[in-house]
Amino acid sequence: MQSIADLRALCAALPHSRETFPFDATTLVFKVGSPDALKMYALTDVQADPVTVSVKVRPERGDELRATHDAITPGYHLNKRHWVTVTLDGRVPDDLIRELIAGSHALVAGGLTRAQRKAMGL
């Protein structure tokens, strides 16, 4: 997985995932939630080369990932304890990238209120 198209397809397959450009024309933000309560779970710069994606992780998982993969760094412009940035240049296995994106989606969706999750079937 090394392209924005791959990343978009992966995120689009997750339940209640939405693409937004809340900051500028190049920062693509993937959010989960109901229309009135969307929360960010991944973001990327559509013009970056190589492509990177920032995802939310549990702090201990982030420490482990940064220690074992040089292509995984603290989240760029994000809370360094809770976010990592993954460079999609082939150094991180696709299975791990998919796991991190799905895990970020699940972590953020889990932070929605019970009523919001129930309304979305999550």
Image (cartoon, rainbow, N blue to C red):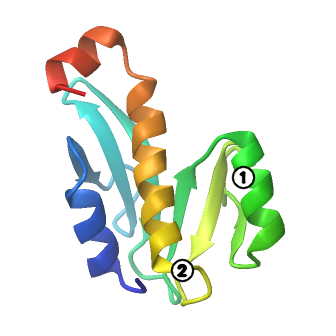
Q: Amino acid at mark 2?
A: Pro
For this orientation, the residue located farthest to the right is 67
For this orientation, the residue located farthest to the front is 95
Q: Would residue 86 be found to the left or right of residue 8 on screen?
A: right
Count of numbered circles on the image? 2
Residue where numbered disc 2 is placed: 93
- x, y percentage for residue 20? 28, 52
The crowding category of the residue bearing disc 2, from other C-alpha atoms within 10 Å (few below 14, some 14 to 19, many at least 20), is: few
Residue where numbered disc 1 is placed: 62
The answer to whether any part of residue 53 appears in the image is yes
- x, y percentage for residue 67? 83, 66
Q: Amino acid at mark 1?
A: Gly
Q: Would residue 95 be found to the left or right of residue 18 on screen?
A: right
Residue pictured at 24% horizontal, 47% vertical: 17
Q: Is residue 48 above or below residue 42?
A: below
Per the rendering, the mark at residue 90 is: none
